[in-house]
Amino acid sequence: MSLIADTPEPPYYAVIFSSHVTGDTEGYAETAARMLELAAEQPGYLGVESVREDLGVTVSYWADLESIRLWKQQAEHRLAQKSGREKWYSSYRIRIARVERDYENRA
Amino acid sequence: MSLIADTPEPPYYAVIFSSHVTGDTEGYAETAARMLELAAEQPGYLGVESVREDLGVTVSYWADLESIRLWKQQAEHRLAQKSGREKWYSSYRIRIARVERDYENRA
């Protein structure tokens, strides 16, 4: 199974979320998994790619900026963001980007 | 040390490289490390974030599309791309995106 998101033809949007977690990761894994599940139910969701070593990078793909705005405001997601800021993340950076081109290779 | 790239104010560009590797990873780790080193020497390079589990996601940041084009054409990088296609990657996808906004939180 490929974990590479099967996104449509550009243009579309990517939210690149890069983070470091603190030592206090109680509840983190469950919430992170729940957020991936919940994101997939949102309007305009196109896919996600998520990887963590020391650094975590989660790229979610969206049809447009309005979909990203709505997801950011989603109630359960807001609670998770609050826990993230207060407990789980020592630092993070979020970048909103417009995907203009993509190409792939499947062996 | 933060592994989150210290990029300047947007706009700038991101190359999101998502991949799965095959069982044949001879030479892969050395070449991947060398490419991160080499990318950092290119004009217009702004930073990189790279993580691998089953899925690998490497996001490199660039000042403009011309810098990305030159990096893609760089001779040693082209050889690495060829090995990647022929040996190391079972599948990959590359997305070129214009970063329009970013925000961060440092604890």
Image (tube, coloured by chain):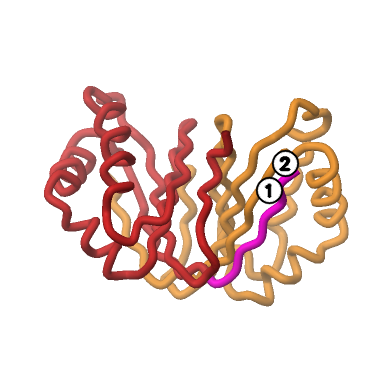
Chain colours: A orange, B red
* Residue type at numbered disc 1: Leu
State which region is magenta: B100-107
Write down the residue under mark 1: A36
Give the Cα distance between marks 2 and 1.
6 Å
Question: Which numbered disc covers residue A21?
Answer: none
Q: Could you tell me which secondary element the residue under label 1 belongs to?
A: helix
Tell us which disc is closer to us: 2 or 1. Answer: 2
Left or right, residue B58 beside residue B80: right
Say which residue appears at 42% left-offset and 65% top-offset: B13
In this view, A8 is above or below B57: below
Secondary structure mainly formed by the magenta segment = strand
Circles 2 and 1, Cβ within 8 Å, touching? The answer is: yes
Q: Quadrant of the C terminus of chain A?
A: top left
Q: Is B11 left, or right, of A101 in this rendering?
A: right
* In the rendered image, residues at marks 2 and 1 fall on the same chain: yes
Residue type, numbered disc 2: Ala
Q: Is residue B43 magenta?
A: no
Residue at image position (46%, 57%) is A6
The chain ID associated with circle 2 is A
Residue in the image at 60% along x and 75% along y:
A64
**Could you say which quadrant of the image residue A70 lies in?**
bottom right
Secondary structure beneath label 2: helix
> Which residue is more in the foreground, A54 or A13?
A54
Seen at 74% across and 48% down, the residue is: A35
Placement of B6 over or under A74, stated as above or below: above
Mark 2 surroundings: few (<14), some (14-19) or many (≥20) residues within 10 A: some
- Is residue A82 positioned above or below B89 on the image? below
B36 left or right of A51 in image: left
- Kindly identify which residue carries mark 2: A32
User: Where residue B23 sits in the image (x, y, percent)?
Assistant: 30, 24
Q: Position of residue B97 (x, y in %)?
A: 44, 66
Vertical position of residue B95 compared to residue A11: above or below: above
